Amino acid sequence: MTKYLISFPGEAMVIPEGQFQAVADDAHAVIEEAKQAGVYVFGGGINEDVAPVRVSGDGSVQPGMYPGHTVPNGGYTVLELPSREAAIEWAAKIAVACRCPQELREFQHDPAS
């Protein structure tokens, strides 16, 4: 099985006035469906109120991101699925729930994970 990252940037999710709870409920329902199907690995949104830092091997901390890197924000879901076609189906479900297109990425196989 392959792990897939399904995500969207924060600015892509435009929720119509008064629809926040419906969007949240729909998104939670898809995640619950993925859990029940046994394909859910991880999901969540980046807390955009907390600034990113870079941590070196010696434990020193630098404020900010790598120079030239864009801010990762929005929502992320990791699912473990048997095929890219299955990943596209789940990405479509999440797109409907979140009211915005999703980016689909495949993790490289790592036998240790």
Image: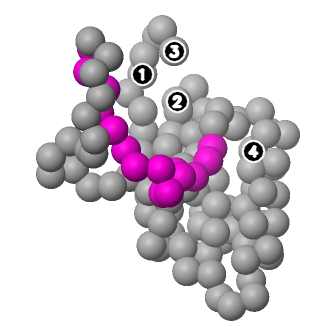
Residue 96's x, y, as percent? 66, 71
- Three-letter code, disc 3: Ser
Secondary structure of residue under mark 4: helix
Whether pointer 1 and pointer 4 mark residues with C-beta atoms closer than 8 Å, the reply is no
Residue at the image point whose x is 44% and y is 63% from the top: 9
Relative to 108, residue 72 above or below: below
Secondary structure of residue under mark 3: loop
Disc with the residue nearer the chain's start (4 vs 2):
2
Dot in front, 4 or 2:
4
In this orientation, which residue lies closer to the viewer: 32 or 49? 49
Residue marked by disc 1: 109
Separation (CA) of disc 1 from disc 3: 8 Å
In this orientation, which residue lies closer to the viewer: 22 or 39? 22
Whether pointer 2 and pointer 1 mark residues with C-beta atoms closer than 8 Å, the reply is yes
Residue marked by disc 4: 34
Whether pointer 2 and pointer 3 mark residues with C-beta atoms closer than 8 Å, the reply is no
Relative to 91, residue 101 above or below: below
Residue marked by disc 3: 113
**Left or right: 82 with respect to 62?**
right
**Left or right: 57 with respect to 38?**
left
**Residue 53 lies in magenta, yes or no?**
yes
Magenta stretch?
Answer: 43-57
Residue at the image point whose x is 79% and y is 39% from the top: 35
Disc with the residue nearer the chain's start (2 vs 1):
2
- Three-letter code, disc 4: Ala
Quadrant (top left, top right, bottom left, bottom right) of the N terminus: top right
Residue marked by disc 2: 2
